[in-house]
Amino acid sequence: MAGVGVDLIGLVGRDGELAELAAFLDAIGTGGAALLLTGDPGVGKTALLDAAAELAVAKGIRVIRGSGVEYETDIGFAGLHQLAAPLSRELERLPPAQREAIEVALGLGAGPPPSRIAVLNAALSLFAMAAEEQPLLLVVDDFHVVDEASRSAMGFVARRLAGHRIGLLGARRGEFGGAFQPAGMAEFEVAPLNEASALRLLSRRFAHLPRRVLRTVARDAQGNPLALLEFAGATAAHDDRRGSGTGWGSGPGRDVRALYAARVERLPQATRDLLLLAALEGFGDIAVIEAAGGPGVLDGLAPAERDHLVMVAQDGHTVRFRHPLVRSAVVDGSTGEQRRGAHRRLADALVDQPERRGDHLARATTAPDEEVAALVELAARSSLRRGDAAGAITRLRRAAGLSPDHAVRRRRLSLAAYVAAWVAGHLEISHEIMREVRDGEPADLSPAAAAAAGFLVLVTEGDADTAHALVMKAIERDPTASGPPPAETEVALFTLTLAGQYSGRPEHWRPLVDLLARFPDASPAGAVSLGRVHHAPGATTDDALRALDEEIARLKDQAEADVVVRTALVASYLDRLPGCREAVSRVIRDGRDGGAVGSSMPALIFVALDHLHAGRWQSSAQAAAELIALCEETGYHLFAQVGHYVAAMVAAQRGDLDQCRAHCERIWGWSRPRGLRRMENCAHQAAARAALGAADFETAFRHATAICAPGELPPFNPEALWSAPDLVEAAVRSGRPDQARRHAEAVRAAGVERLSSRFALSSATITAMTARPEDAVARFEAALAVPDTEQWPFEVARAHLAFGETLRRQGLNRDARVRLAAARDRFERLGAASWQARAEAELRATGMTRTARGTSGTPLTPQELEVARLAAAGLSNPEIAVRLFLSPRTVSSHLYRVFPKLGITSRAALRDALDALAPEPPSARP
């Protein structure tokens, strides 16, 4: 240490800790490092932070310091503000979008609300830019009381330090546990000093005290360095040389605070008032403190500085308490009226910062006051726009507590409960708030309260009946439920639509349809639009589609997770998820980094579906697995069922029948007792798709018709539309052509082909499958000519397969091979094993295969070989006939010729005989 000119003589007994910090600082210069010191109050964490900062400066590292403040934990990004404020020069050099994001988040500028992930990325870029010229050390004391948004930001930075010369060094009290340790920061526990080190420290600082007194102090302080110094200082001040014992009593941390309290109490009143302003202001901003205290107030700092209770930065802009316990002693030693007065003065000094002003006004107000409550609610909405859901919830609850009107109070609490459940993902907090809403007033919930209560019971218990009853009753009683829906009614309508959507039962969606008719056309992402699209997608107007496309284009600048999720929800029914991909992924990243966890669950649904339709099945399965795990962890059991549906669809299309069945059973087991027909239909869709891949057309028809009857596309049943190709194909291949035609006609009548290229392709394909033989080829060619279909690779492959099967049935083997080979290759690229096998079987049936010889030396024809393989797999003659478009009599004739060629006399011997065949060179039969 001496080699770098740093005097750390006061840190006795900390050789191990200092070596750890030196290694940490060395790591900064080679690619970044993050470390969190933990330990009891007064154990020396702050002193070690000071030593690290001093040593860093000596090593040429730039140091920026911040600290958590227990009275400011609900001010979003307050801790980040302390670290970013000194980097104004670097902030100006950030790209405009990043600069705007962090300035808006920190209240330094105006602009559209940024997402939390945008703020976190901007913060990382800011620190990385600062570290380009000189390594950067960010030091954060009292990490356990840093606001949640800043803690999230610091964790985000800590996990991405590789390649950057940035160090993040924090300290927190050990009793707060791991919840206050951001991922990416290693922990290092700071232990009390041993007895020898404690005595050595006391001997250096208090050599004039008798040894017996020092031993008594060492015993009472229990190795806590701050307690050692303060106890000994108090003993020396009172000239206690009798060695009778100091009697400090119940623990060094509490007793040191008492000593600090005594020192604060001896200060002049003006100084104590100024320290109270500084403690409650939280940022140490001398300009704000001076504005709150009045001209000349800063002169009062001198006594506290002389007593080493506070330190003023060299630039004169900030003041810092010597130790967090000093700040606590200042606040604890003040009266309630003194604190309220300080908060009022700070509010007056913060007129240009609405969130902080609202917080101070709330703390200064004891009686209900609507004017203050309204300001706090505005601050809450500002927090929500900045991506600070936790801060929004806290402020809404505070605003509710200040509301004179009970109805307004319930509205604010209900909104807080809804944000907690839908955006933040905090179900326990949401339930707690709803208990407050219901306290003493169990009946006649407002639309906002009903929406929050209904949403909770729907997503956690899957109780669509209760959710629908609660919200429908509240909306019917609400006199404002006409014209454009106000914010509270909009939330209620959204919850009501979700209940009807997942239920899928007429008793839920019919009243909703009648209710929606009372409202005019709404925004594309509004609840009214969602309800109408879900009711009848084909009725969506061209104007509505254009408006939705414009809304999707604006998502790149949209920070509110709620808006992103609702837009993507409407888009998912109209095949427009690819345009939402970037915004939805941003919501998920935000949730992973501690932001909108609640919103990240539906966002994961959309990402999983987007990957599924685009043929990125591994990514789809991973998103579904993440969704299921997150839902099980947080209690959002309804959304987990959607995760199982996506996983089942991936397994179905891959040909993993056991996996598909397992996920479907999970859905049926959870959804059937709750009457959630929508989720039951989802499982039937996956089961039908899996059966089709395995060429089990009877089973596929049974599952597809469980969703809807042939020729019907019921309202509020999107799976009926999505599974229409499955039903038609199963009907055609199981000998039900009339039912297949009826269903194809119903799809055409629905008018969905203009919604997207996927719907257009599916509609054209099932039209071709059910066309007259002389028209089929032209119909299939028209289907495959639909533009912009390559983004739906599975549907395109299915169209090629169906076309090839039709051509083979018509005896056009050469043309059939082209289509079937295209289908096989596409299925192979997708990893659709069972569907690939179907295409290969059809190819073999055209003669494009390897011939095989039986034991008699007579080769099997391609048709005989395919019949033999299907018979060996256990299919009956009628089933083989359906599969190969033959008559049962023809199948029987083939088998009659196969048995002697293979040298067997029964079907039971087919499998072994086929396994023993030796392949020959490929046949070139036409």
Image (tube, rainbow, N blue to C red):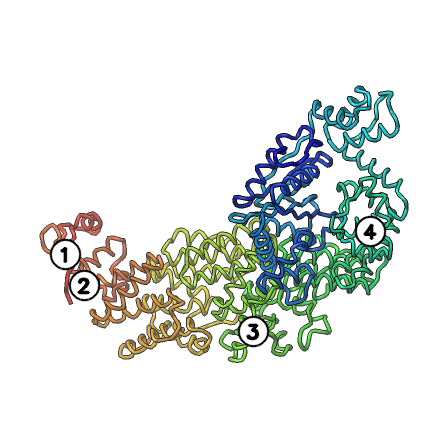
Residue flagged by tag 2: what amino acid is it?
Answer: Gly
Q: Callout 1: 10 Å neighbours few (<14), some, many (20+)? A: few
Secondary structure of the residue carrying tag 1 is strand
Label located before the other in sequence (3 or 4):
4
- Tag 3, which secondary structure? helix
Left or right? Give the position of 95 relative to 253: left
Mark 4 or mark 1: whose residue is earlier in sequence: 4
> Is label 1 in contact with label 3 (beta carbons under 8 Å)?
no
The numbered dot on residue 921 is 1
Q: Which residue does the numbered mark 2 point to in the structure image?
A: 847
> Mark 4 and mark 1: span between their CA atoms?
92 Å
Vertical arrangement, residue 134 with respect to residue 411, above or below: above
User: What residue lies at 61% left-to-right and 75% top-to-bottom?
Assistant: 522
The quarter of the image holding the N terminus is top right
- Residue 512 at x, y percent in the picture: 61, 71
In what element is the residue under mark 4?
Answer: helix
Question: Which is in the foreground here, disc 3 or disc 4?
Answer: 4
Which of the pair 21/62 is nearer the observer?
62
Disc 3 target residue: 532
Crowd around label 2: few <14 · some 14–19 · many ≥20 (10 Å): many
Amino acid type at mark 4: Leu
Mark sitting earlier along the chain (2/3): 3
Query: Does residue 431 appear in the picture of this structure?
Result: no
**Alpha-carbon distance for marks 1 and 3?**
60 Å
